[in-house]
Amino acid sequence: MSANVETRSGARRAGAAEARAWRLGSAGVGAALVLLLLVNVAMGDLRPSAGFGLAYGVLAAVAMLGAAALAVRRRTMRLSTRLGLGRTRAWLYFHLYGGTLFALLVLMHTGFQLPAGVLGWWLWLLSLWTVLTGFLGLALQQWIPKALGSGLGLEVHYDRIPELVAELRDRAEELASTASEPVRQLHQRQVAPELAAPTRRWRYFIDPTGSIHARLRAFEYLRGLLGGDDRDGVTELEALLRAKLEMDAHYTLQWALRSWLYLHVPTSLVLVVLVVVHVGTIVYY
Ligand code: HEM
């Protein structure tokens, strides 16, 4: 047992050290690039096609291909491991830090100017979009598991939510069918419309737990006015509605965690193709 705990805390320490090494290494490379840029500015030629500018472009293309290679690594796990191509975690770090340095290199390559020509604009906008959506995804990956784990009482798999909501709906209908008029009315007005189907709501991005508490305040008030069985009925309806609203929070936030990749991956693949076209055109002509 204690050997297990030690192994786990050892792995955590090694993970933290690895993360720090990548952070420091990338900060070092970033600083070296800025220094190079200062020398370049002092020498006075920031054109993309001149010596320094060309080197930034080549480095940007290498960083981008390295970042995109994460997708290949993930889809060739066995082959990559057999070929000793490193752990996926290292590729993920390269993706995050290499992708960030890619943004800096693109700006350096274009001399911090707006691009010229249609291909130039597409390359510039897609680079910006890919990096911004990458940071958006990273932020969601950090924040959503914490937000879902901290204030909510439920843990639920995204795919099971519709079926679990249907179970809550059936239970609430069964309860209402034998309840007194006030409880039936509460069910009809406040609970039944909510339990109709899983719902995504923007407010869960702001405060998942707070917005649920606010919705349930009416139940507290009504419970104070009723007695005996009615009170128990209200309490059970409240529990069912709370469970549903918590499932909605999962339905909204887990969906965002899955869906942001649609903003990032397809455009990043178009970017890779356009960079290949861009480099091919320059080499050819
Ligand atoms: C050089 C430009 C970039 C390209 C071409 C690119 C492309 C991709 C691709 C193809 C994937 C899917 C990988 C897979 O199939 O598993 C991905 C995932 C991802 N990207 Fe990027 N990306 C770039 C830059 C960035 C940047 C700058 C960030 C943020 C700092 C970022 C954050 C992420 C994250 C968090 C994932 C999900 C990784 C995971 O946990 O599975 N990307 N990217």
Image (cartoon, helix red, strand yellow):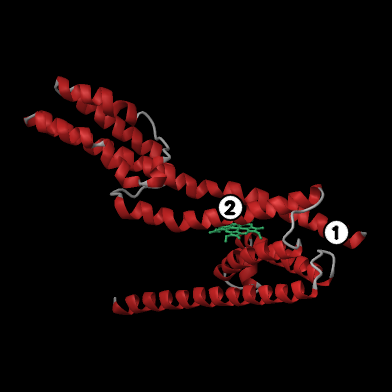
Q: Quadrant of residue 279?
A: bottom right
**Element assignment for label 2:** helix
Q: Amino acid at mark 2?
A: Thr
Q: Amino acid at mark 1?
A: Gly
The residue that mark 1 highlights is: 280
The residue that mark 2 highlights is: 133
State yes or no: Cβ of the residue under disc 2 lies below 8 Å from any atom of ligand 1. Answer: yes
Image point (60%, 73%), residue name = 86
Q: Quadrant of the C terminus?
A: bottom right
Which residue occupies the foreground of this view, 21 or 53?
53
Q: Which class describes the residues within 10 Å of circle 1: few (<14), some (14-19), or many (20+)?
A: few
Q: Quadrant of the N terminus?
A: bottom left
Chain-order first, disc 2 or disc 1: 2
**Element assignment for label 1:** helix
Left/right of residue 74 with respect to residue 50 in the rendered view: left
> At which x and y percent is residue 10?
40, 79
Left/right of residue 137 with respect to residue 280 in the rendered view: left
Image point (65%, 48%), residue name = 266
Left/right of residue 166 with respect to residue 219 in the rendered view: right
Q: Quadrant of ligand 1?
A: bottom right
3D distance between C-alphas at marks 2 and 1: 27 Å
> At which x and y percent is residue 117?
82, 49
249 w.r.t. 145: above or below? above
Q: Is residue 137 visible?
A: yes
97 w.r.t. 7: above or below? above
Image point (38%, 74%), residue name = 8
Which residue occupies the foreground of this view, 38 or 239?
38
